[in-house]
Image (tube, grey):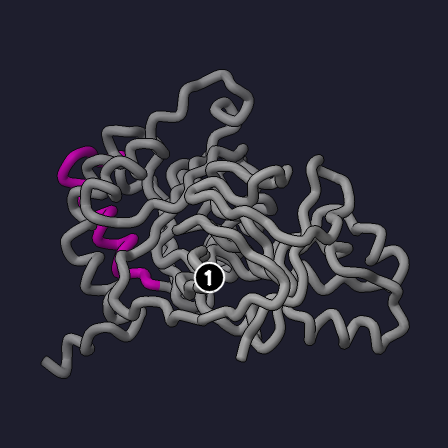
C-alpha cells in the first residue's frame, strides 16, 4: 500500500526544506507556512522514496527535503501517472498537475553528484480538499477521469507586449473564449518573439503539464522576428496541415491579407498546438470558426471517440 514517508516545508524560497511532524493543506492554496504555496498549479511537490534510495545507492548524501519535495511517498511510480490523477491522504485531496520541471540553474545536489532526480521524477499537485498530512498516512491513488474537461493554455508572442509597451488583448481573449466553450484553461503567458523560449514553453505544456490544447497568437507573419511556425514545427511529432489551411481559407473571406499568414498546427504527443493570428479581431473570428470541429479532433486524439471513417 502506498504511504507517506515524510513531509517537509521551507518557509522562504531558495532555502532547503526541512522535515516536520505534519503539514496542513489548504484548499486552493497549498501548505500552510510553505513558501511555495499560492494560487498556482505547483502548490505541493511529491517525490517517491524509491527514487531517493536509488540516488543514495550511487553514493550521494541527501536527506528528505533536499530535492525541494514536500511529500516523500512510497509505493507509487509518481512520474508514470497522468496529469489529473488524484491522491487521497486522510481528509486531504491532491490533484497531479505537472510531471517534473525544467532546471534552469543546477542546484547544490547536481553540483555535488552530477545529477538531480527532481526535474524528471518529482511531480507537482494542487490542493482540492484541505487536511492534515503526516508520515505514516496511507495514500489512495484515484485514476484521472477518462472523460474529464479538455485542458487548454495560450501563449502570446509579442516583443512590445513582453516589454510592457503594448497591452496583450489576444491572449486573454483566447482564454475567455475557451472558458466560455467549456475548456479548463490552466494557464496563459506572454513572451517575446523568441523561438527558443517558445519551444521550451510548448514542451512544458505538452510533456510536463499534458495540456490537451495550446493556442499561440502572434509571430506568424513576414517579419524576421516572426518565428512561431518554425518553433511549433520543431516540437511537433505530427503536423495537422488541414487546420492551418482551413483557418487561412476562412480568413481569406474576411481579408486578402490572410494569404500572408504562415501559421501552422501540429501535435506533440497528445497535445494539439495551433497558431492563431496576432490581432484580437482575427483571434475571435478564427476561434469562432474552429471551436465546433476542434472538439471532435481532440476526442479522437485522446482516443475518446471513433475515427470518422468508422462511423
What residue range appears in magenta? 240-257
Q: Is residue 121 visible?
A: no
Can you tell which quarter of the image residue 302 is in?
bottom left
Q: Is residue 53 left or right of residue 226?
A: right
Q: Nearer the viewer, residue 118 or 70?
A: 70
Q: Is residue 292 left or right of residue 35?
A: left
Q: Nearer the viewer, residue 83 or 226?
A: 83
Question: Percent x, y for residue 168?
Answer: 40, 25
SS for callout 1: loop
The answer to whether 75 is drawn above or below residue 254 in the figure is below
Rendered-image quadrant of the C terminus: bottom left
**Quick check: is 306 in the magenta stretch?**
no
To which residue does mark 1 refer? 90
- Residue name at image x 42 percent, y 65 percent: 85
Q: Is residue 254 left or right of residue 14?
A: left
Q: Which residue sits furthest top?
A: 165
- Residue name at image x 71 percent, y 35 percent: 12
Q: Is residue 99 visible?
A: yes
Amino acid at each position: 500500500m502506498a504511504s507517506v514517508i515524510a513531509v517537509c516545508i521551507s518557509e522562504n524560497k531558495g532555502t532547503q526544506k526541512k522535515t516536520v511532524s505534519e503539514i496542513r493543506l489548504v484548499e486552493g492554496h497549498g501548505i500552510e507556512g510553505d513558501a511555495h504555496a499560492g494560487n498556482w498549479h505547483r502548490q505541493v511537490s511529491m517525490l517517491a522514496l524509491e527514487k531517493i534510495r536509488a540516488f543514495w545507492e550511487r553514493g550521494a548524501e541527501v536527506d528528505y527535503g533536499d530535492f525541494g519535495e514536500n511529500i516523500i511517498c512510497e509505493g507509487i511510480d509518481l512520474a508514470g501517472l497522468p496529469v489529473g490523477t488524484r491522491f487521497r491522504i486522510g481528509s486531504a485531496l491532491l490533484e497531479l498537475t505537472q510531471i517534473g520541471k525544467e532546471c534552469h540553474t543546477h542546484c547544490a545536489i547536481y553540483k555535488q553528484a552530477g545529477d538531480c532526480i527532481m526535474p524528471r521524477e518529482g511531480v507537482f499537485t494542487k490542493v482540492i480538499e484541505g487536511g492534515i498530512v503526516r508520515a505514516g498516512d496511507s495514500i489512495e491513488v484515484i485514476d484521472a477521469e477518462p472523460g474529464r474537461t479538455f485542458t487548454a493554455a495560450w501563449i502570446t508572442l509579442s516583443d512590445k507586449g513582453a516589454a510592457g509597451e503594448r497591452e496583450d488583448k489576444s491572449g486573454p481573449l483566447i482564454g475567455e473564449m475557451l472558458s466560455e466553450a467549456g475548456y479548463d484553461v490552466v494557464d496563459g503567458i506572454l513572451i517575446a518573439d523568441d523561438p527558443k523560449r517558445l519551444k521550451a514553453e510548448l514542451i512544458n505544456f505538452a510533456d510536463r503539464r499534458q495540456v490537451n490544447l495550446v493556442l499561440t497568437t502572434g509571430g506568424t507573419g513576414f517579419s524576421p522576428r516572426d518565428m512561431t511556425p518554425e518553433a511549433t514545427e520543431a516540437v511537433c511529432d505530427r503536423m495537422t496541415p488541414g487546420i492551418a489551411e482551413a483557418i487561412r481559407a476562412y480568413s481569406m473571406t474576411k481579408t486578402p491579407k490572410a494569404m500572408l499568414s504562415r501559421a501552422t498546427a501540429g501535435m506533440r504527443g497528445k497535445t494539439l498546438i495551433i497558431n492563431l493570428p496576432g490581432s484580437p479581431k482575427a483571434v475571435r473570428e478564427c476561434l469562432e470558426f474552429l471551436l465546433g470541429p476542434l472538439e471532435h479532433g481532440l476526442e479522437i486524439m485522446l482516443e475518446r471517440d471513433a475515427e470518422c471513417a468508422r462511423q
